Image: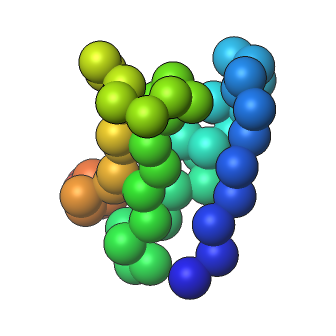
Amino acid sequence: MAMNHIDDPSEDAIYMLIDDLKDSDNTFFVIQPDEDAPAWYVSAAVLERARATK
């Protein structure tokens, strides 16, 4: 499992993380303050990609 750490991610870095999410690999990311007991965090994952139908 590859893990990356980004100190103080920019808005562009967050968009890149969202764009890199893949439902087939069950990928996710978490953003939280760098402290022992953070009061908040954000987690994002792709559950299933919508499929276009005609």
Residue 18 lies, in percent from the top left, at 54, 41
Count numbered badges in the picture.
0
Question: Quadrant of residue 40 in the image?
Answer: top left
Looking at the image, can residue 11 be seen?
yes
Tell me which residue sits at (69%, 17%) in the image. 11
**Quadrant assignment for the C terminus:** bottom left
Residue 47 lies, in percent from the top left, at 24, 58
Q: Is residue 14 above or below residue 46?
A: above
Question: Quadrant of residue 1 in the image?
Answer: bottom right
Looking at the image, can residue 52 be seen?
no
Which is more toward the observer, 42 or 51?
Answer: 42
Residue 42 lies, in percent from the top left, at 36, 30
Q: Is residue 50 above or below residue 7?
A: below
Q: Is residue 20 left or right of residue 27?
A: right
Tell me which residue sits at (44%, 43%) in the image. 30
Q: Is residue 20 above or below residue 32?
A: below
Tell me which residue sits at (64%, 75%) in the image. 2
Q: What colouring does the structure picture have?
A: rainbow
Which is more toward the observer, 24 or 41?
Answer: 41
Q: Is residue 26 left or right of residue 53?
A: right
Residue 5 lies, in percent from the top left, at 70, 49
Q: Is residue 46 left or right of residue 18?
A: left
Which is more toward the observer, 40 or 47?
Answer: 40
Q: Is residue 42 above or below residue 50?
A: above
Tell me which residue sits at (63%, 66%) in the image. 3
